Amino acid sequence: MTTKAPRAWQRMLSGRRLDLLDPSPLDVEVSDIAHGLARVARWNGQTSGDHAFSVAQHSLVVEDIFRRLNEATPEQCLMALLHDAPEYVIGDMISPFKSVVGGGYKTVEKRLEAAINLRFGLPPHPSRELKDNIKKADTIAAYFEASQLAGFSASEAQKLFGQPRGITREMLLLTPLPATEAQRLFCERFAAIDGMRGKP
């Protein structure tokens, strides 16, 4: 008796069917990414405010910080904006749980990252230098999110994420937005960056 393989694909609102085991760039749409990320909460939803602080809004903050700290090309800015894009399918797993789960999660995440980046004409994965620069922006965002939204003291956030230099809270869009607003802003920023590509 043969057992039926478990379903490993997700239906998107665009109508696409994305296979988690073998994701195709042809099944990736920015509208699905923005919709999903705007409805995934950072910090497992343990943030202050009337709305969850979404991964879409976090992505906007990270790209903003990245751009302020680097003389970046539009392609690099797009990779910064999309740095957490696989979470539109697999959700935002908090770092402590990632360390418990181990390598299987990372394998799926890497496949999705490659499919997403290839869909938008980017290298499948960022270079080591670019990845480090995006990670720096991500860590700065995490410091402000932790200390301003997630109940961490400033000293606790500093111990975990370091003390940001050259970036202040006033520069950043940290007030949690409704999902539809975060989705709209993510799509607008994607379109703005994409519109600059290939232009002098």
Image (tube, grey):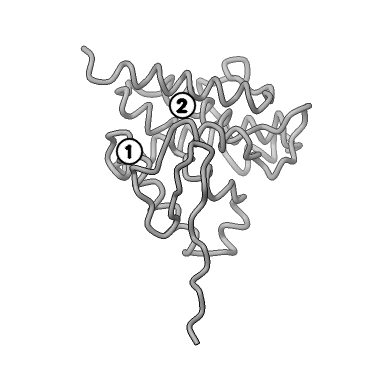
**Residue at 72 percent of width and 36 percent of height:** 150
Q: Disc 1 on helix, strand or loop?
A: helix
The x, y position of residue 176, in whole percent, is 69, 25
Which one is closest to the eye, mark 2 or mark 1?
1
Task: Tell me the CA gap for discs 2 and 1.
Answer: 19 Å
Does label 2 or label 1 sit earlier along the sequence?
A: 2
Tell me which corner region of the image, top left, top right, bottom left or bottom right, holds residue 29. Answer: top left
Tell me which corner region of the image, top left, top right, bottom left or bottom right, holds residue 149. Answer: top right
Query: What is the three-letter code of the residue carrying label 2?
Result: Glu
| Picture mark count | 2
The x, y position of residue 103, in whole percent, is 47, 64
Q: Is residue 69 above or below residue 29?
A: above
How packed mark 2 is, by other alpha carbons closer than 10 Å (few <14, some 14-19, many 20 or more), is many
How packed mark 1 is, by other alpha carbons closer than 10 Å (few <14, some 14-19, many 20 or more), is some
Q: Which mark is residue 67?
A: none
Side of 155 relative to 129 (left or right): right
Query: What is the three-letter code of the residue carrying label 1?
Result: Arg
Q: Camera-side residue: 49 or 26?
A: 26
Which residue bears the numbered disc 1? 119
**Residue at 22 percent of width and 19 percent of height:** 198
Which residue bears the numbered disc 2? 63
The x, y position of residue 195, in whole percent, is 33, 17
**Residue at 39 percent of width and 46 percent of height:** 113
Side of 96 relative to 120 (left or right): right
